[in-house]
Amino acid sequence: MRRMKIIVTKFGGSSVADNIQIDKVKDIITSDKRRKYVVVSAPGKRSENDIKITDTLYTCKRNIEENLPFEQIFQIVVDRFTEIQKKLGTDVDFDKEFSIILENMKKGACQDYVASRGEYLNGKMIARYIGYDFIDAAKVIKFDEKGRFLEEKTDKALKRELSKHEYALIPGFYGSKPDGSIKTFSRGGSDVTGALVARASEASVYENWTDVSGFLMADPRIVKDPKPIESLTFQELRELSYMGASVLHEDAIYPAKIAGIPINIRNTNRPQDKGTIITAEPGKRSKERIITGIAGSKDFTVIAIYKNMLSTERGFIRKLAGIMEDYDIPLEHLPSGIDTVSAVISNKAINDRLGELVDEIKQQLHPDSIDVFDDIALIATVGLGMAARQGVSAKLFGALAGANVNVRMIDQGSSEMNIIVGVNNKDFKTAIRAIYEAFENQ
Ligand code: ASP
């Protein structure tokens, strides 16, 4: 007999923010028996100005460190869980759990322990509510003593534990080090836990339930009603998220990708929507369309360096990269011409050291001249369909010219699946709208 396919579902903070949302989660899980393993975040925002439980917990820990009162802040967490539990009618012994956490906090428990309690408590309660076994993530998500994630060890531990449970819930975001202390992934890390569970259980799909119906072709705050992206590849997703499109934690991609498990972004508030499906290989639709999406970020600096015969000088790029390394500034892009090269770096990474950095470049590289533009926005137009198709850049640059946007820099990835343009910060939105309109109907 063939084993029933497993679907792993992960629900983000807004999907589990209160009892009404948790009811929707229960409906989604129980509507398909294949949804055997569930990963949840801590309760997130119930409205725009609400505060996530995880943020409240971080504040709690900060207060403890600064010798400020923290009990009142922890009470916010207590009240929120107590209220949800009351409305759901579950019977987790929260009094006991809260007093253990308080006790540990007083004894100086680490920040990651405190931050992880939102997922832990929520996981216990929701597991009870949906009738699933609870697996403490500390038991199955492994880090080494230095806090580095242990991929294979985790996979083994997860496989072993999951094989004992037909239906189980695992809280997201955290795991443990060899001494048993808690370690979390970076913020938004429940997505990573979900991907790991999907890999270990050889799921047929990893459903990531959030509050949007997947990826859109452009940021809806910039473009009115952008079209949804029905499907895209992991590679396209990487390009889009690098440039600022954020729906999924970046580290969630790898485990799903190596295991060949598609990720389906779904909307808890609109389960009827198909969402976006992310796969390793391009589907039919991905090949037909030209561009998949447009994403961008503001506030980059371009340091354009000119030097006669630069292209034949040995070690020039190495020295430039070395300076950036010394300053701990990631080189985002490095477009080059015959006797020019431009270092594109983020303003955040420069952090007021621009003058110093330019002096260092002058001293070490002796350029003929340097131009610095510190208000550059980068916009990536991404799509597998662009490769080997003529006229795409003509259309893109035509659209930018038509919108009176001056292009300050161009970089095309060697895979031919993206074109990155640098424009002035002030032209950021105009440029995105112009590109979107040019390709909206492909
Ligand atoms: N609760 C954690 C955060 O707010 C992790 C997550 O939700 O994925 O970052």
Image (tube, rainbow, N blue to C red):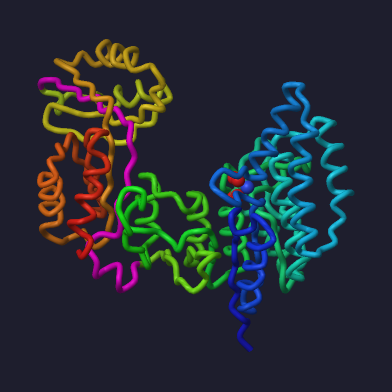
Residue at 80% x, 30% y is 108
Residue 199 x, y percent position in the rendering = 57, 63
| Magenta segment includes 298 | yes
Q: Is residue 324 found left or right of 339 in the rendered image?
A: right
* Residue 356 x/y as whole percent: 34, 12
Residue most extreme to the bottom? 1
- Confirm whether the magenta stretch covers residue 325: no
Task: Left or right? Give the position of 265 relative to 300.
Answer: right
Residue 313's place in the image compared with 1, above or below, is above
Residue nearer the viewer, 267 or 365: 267
Q: Quadrant of residue 73?
A: top right
Q: Quarter of the image for the N terminus: give it.
A: bottom right
Q: Is residue 430 above or below residue 161?
A: above
What's the magenta region?
Answer: 282-308
Exactly how many numbered labels are in the figure?
0
Q: Depth check: give the residue in front, 21 or 182.
A: 21
- The residue depicted at 84 percent of the width and 31 percent of the height is 106
Residue 413: x %, y % from top left: 25, 47
Quick check: can you spot residue 260? no
Q: Quadrant of residue 67?
A: top right
On screen, 46 above or below 350? Answer: below
Is any atom of residue 120 visible in this view? Answer: yes
Question: Which residue occupies 73% across, 62% down?
Answer: 126
Residue 345 position, x and y percent, is 33, 30
Q: Quadrant of the C terminus?
A: bottom left
Q: Answer with left or right where residue 265 lies relative to residue 219.
A: right
**Nearest the eye: 205 or 92:** 92
Which of the two residues, 141 or 97, is positioned nearer the viewer here?
97
Question: Quick check: 375 left or right of 169?
Answer: left
